[in-house]
Image: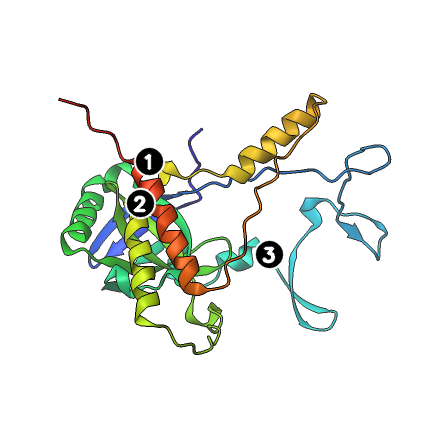
């Protein structure tokens, strides 16, 4: 099922306007559970309860309130949000172009696809190919879900991908890592292990094994089968760092040898 556009507007690229629609680029496949009453397995129901009127409140009676002091609120409705004087509500105005490597991974929040509207196909294509040629990322702002996001626009697989970014004041301070001396031999061994495990990134080769195991567990319980878990073989603890690296390199080499295709005898 195709995703629905969550935002429609335009990219403002200098004097060029590109009408676009914004779609989520990802979806979660987490297994969801309902909360049940342990005694009779009745599904629990959560209600929006007003303690003053002592009754459940329907959606059309709910408004958003900002608490500026204990128990005191400024109430805002949809019209208030629409009145905000922000161009990013309807336009992604490009403010800069930067190298992708300049944006640290910690800043990336969520990915979306930008699709051109019918009259915006040619300027969209121009923008996309210009980004590909210059190998740069465009920075701008977009207002989504009552919040203005910093965003990065990049070419990806023949389309423009938009990624919302955290602001600098939303990034927590990095932890202070204690100093420790590393020997040249340990560094060489770690480098060898990295070389053995180096591969091209192929996302299709990675799967959510936890979700698969959970679905199998649910199916087994549904069919009344007993779930038996095989105990992992116990291994001796390796406390020496160099020994741990050596064993890791040996294991990686064995795995690489098994995975390598055998040559046919001529």
Please indicate whether residue 6 sits to the left or right of residue 155 in the image: right
Depth order, front residue of 230/160:
230
Does the image show residue 29?
no
> Is residue 109 positioned above or below 2 on the image?
below
Residue 150 location, quadrant:
bottom left
Q: Tell which tag, 1 or 3, sits nearer the viewer.
A: 1
Q: Which residue is mark 3?
A: 77
Does the image show residue 122?
yes
Badge number at residue 200: none
Residues at circles 3 and 2 in contact by the CB criterion of under 8 Å: no
* Chosen colour scheme: rainbow
Give the residue drawn at x 42%, y 67%: 167
**Residue 63 coordinates in the image, percent (x, y):** 66, 55
Q: Tell which tag, 2 or 1, sits nearer the viewer.
A: 1
Depth order, front residue of 197/104:
197
Q: Which residue is mark 1?
A: 258
Task: Bin the neighbour count of mark 2 within 10 Å (Cα to Cα): few under 14, some 14-19, many 20 and up.
Answer: few
> Is residue 17 positioned above or below 240 on the image?
above
| Mark 1 element type | helix
Task: Bin the neighbour count of mark 1 within 10 Å (Cα to Cα): few under 14, some 14-19, many 20 and up.
Answer: few
> Is residue 16 positioned above or below 104 on the image?
above
Q: Which residue is mark 2?
A: 201
Residues at circles 2 and 1 in contact by the CB criterion of under 8 Å: no
**Residue 34 coordinates in the image, percent (x, y):** 70, 38
Residue 74 location, quadrant:
bottom right
| Mark 3 element type | loop
Q: Which mark sits nearer the N-terminus, 3 or 2?
A: 3
| Mark 2 element type | loop
Q: CA distance from mark 1 to mark 3?
A: 63 Å
């Amino acid at each position: 099922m195709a995703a629905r556009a969550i935002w429609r507007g335009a990219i403002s690229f200098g004097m060029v306007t590109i009408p676009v629609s914004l779609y989520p680029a990802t979806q979660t496949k987490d297994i969801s559970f309902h909360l049940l009453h342990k005694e009779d397995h009745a599904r629990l129901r959560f209600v929006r309860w007003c303690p003053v009127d002592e009754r459940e409140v329907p959606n059309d009676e709910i408004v958003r309130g900002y608490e500026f002091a204990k128990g005191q609120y400024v109430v805002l409705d949809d019209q208030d949000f629409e009145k905000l004087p922000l161009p990013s509500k309807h336009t992604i105005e490009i403010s800069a172009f930067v190298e992708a490597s300049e944006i640290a991974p910690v800043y990336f929040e969520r990915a979306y696809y930008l699709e051109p509207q019918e009259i915006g196909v040619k300027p969209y294509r121009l923008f996309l190919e210009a980004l590909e040629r210059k190998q740069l990322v465009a920075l701008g702002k977009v207002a989504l879900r009552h919040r203005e996001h910093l965003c990065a626009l990049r070419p990806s697989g023949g389309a423009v991908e938009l990624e919302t970014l955290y602001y600098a004041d939303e990034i927590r301070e990095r932890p202070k890592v204690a100093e420790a001396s590393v020997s040249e031999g340990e560094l060489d061994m770690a480098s060898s292990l990295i070389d053995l495990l180096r591969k091209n990134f192929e996302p299709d080769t990675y799967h959510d094994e936890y979700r698969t195991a959970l679905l199998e567990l649910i199916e087994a319980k549904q069919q009344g089968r007993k779930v038996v878990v095989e105990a992992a073989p116990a291994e001796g603890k390796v406390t020496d760092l160099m020994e741990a690296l050596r064993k890791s390199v040996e294991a990686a080499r064995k795995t690489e040898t098994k995975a390598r295709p055998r040559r046919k005898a001529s």
